[in-house]
């Protein structure tokens, strides 16, 4: 299974751009950690970063028939680009919208996403670790159980080693 990880404008500056807000992890650090997780999950990843809207749209179009899903941090374009939303919907790939910061605790213009209504999920506020959380969630939602996520059903926590399975109570 191939998952594409797309990053939008200014994400090439991770690690140096406002580190008190975005943290000290660089985009290379994020990719290194995600590649390690991908090996564990037995998925293949591709990465790209684009500062321009057109480049990001071209990268999305190129995924048609080549990926099972997308993790996208479109940066500021998340809040303004119908074109990126239309590209994601047009290639008919499930995607997770991802943000390093909690966009809902920031400026009002960041609190609306053009992508979210079409996304499988939206994840924000976990810093660079959010990429890994998004990968685990997307892989599981695509039907490949993510390592460490062996709960009894959707939305249930992973089973503890040695724990007995619980049956739902009705009544």
Image (cartoon, rainbow, N blue to C red):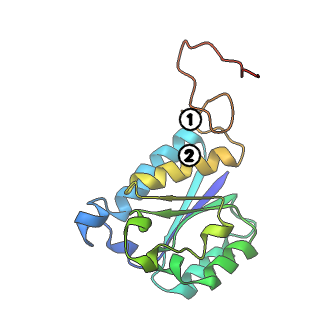
The quadrant of the image that shows the C terminus is top right
Please tell me which residue lies in front, 138 or 78: 78
- Residue 54 vs 153, above or below: the answer is below
Residue 23 image offset from top left, x and y in percent: 28, 60
Determine the residue positioned at 32% across, 73% down.
13
Q: Earlier in the sequence, mark 1 or mark 2?
A: 2
Q: Which residue is mark 1?
A: 147
Please tell me which residue lies in front, 112 or 5: 112
Left or right placement of residue 19 versus residue 47 in this view: left
Q: Quadrant of residue 130?
A: bottom left
Would you say the residues marked 1 and 2 are in contact, meaning their CB atoms lie under 8 Å apart? yes
Give the crowd class for mark 1: few <14, some 14-19, many >=20 residues within 10 Å.
some
| Marking on residue 27 | none
Left or right placement of residue 103 versus residue 62 in this view: left
Residue 88 image offset from top left, x and y in percent: 67, 73
As drawn, which residue projects farthest toward the front? 171
Please tell me which residue lies in front, 125 or 91: 125
Q: Secondary structure at mark 1?
A: loop
Q: Number of labelled discs?
A: 2
Determine the residue positioned at 70% across, 57% down.
68
CA gap between label 1 and label 2 equals 8 Å
Determine the residue positioned at 58% across, 34% down.
149
Give the crowd class for mark 2: few <14, some 14-19, many >=20 residues within 10 Å.
many
Residue 127 image offset from top left, x and y in percent: 37, 57
Residue 50 image offset from top left, x and y in percent: 48, 79
Q: Which residue is mark 2?
A: 136
Determine the residue positioned at 68% across, 47% down.
141
Left or right placement of residue 42 versus residue 19 in this view: right
Q: Secondary structure at mark 2?
A: helix
């Amino acid at each position: 299974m191939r998952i594409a990880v797309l990053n939008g404008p200014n994400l090439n500056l991770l690690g140096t751009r406002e580190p008190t807000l975005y943290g000290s992890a660089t985009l290379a650090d994020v990719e290194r950690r995600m590649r390690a997780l991908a090996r564990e999950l037995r998925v293949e990843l591709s990465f790209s970063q684009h500062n321009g809207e057109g480049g990001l749209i071209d990268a999305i179009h190129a995924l048609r028939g080549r990926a099972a899903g997308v993790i996208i941090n479109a940066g500021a374009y998340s809040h303004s680009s119908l074109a990126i939303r239309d590209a994601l919907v047009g290639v008919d790939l499930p995607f997770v919208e991802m943000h390093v910061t909690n966009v809902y605790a920031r400026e009002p213009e960041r609190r609306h996403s053009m992508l979210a209504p079409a996304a499988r999920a939206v994840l924000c506020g976990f810093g660079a670790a959010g990429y890994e959380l998004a990968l685990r969630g997307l892989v599981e939602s695509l039907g490949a159980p993510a390592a460490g996520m062996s709960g009894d059903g959707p939305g249930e926590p992973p089973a503890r080693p040695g724990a007995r399975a619980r049956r739902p109570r009705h009544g």
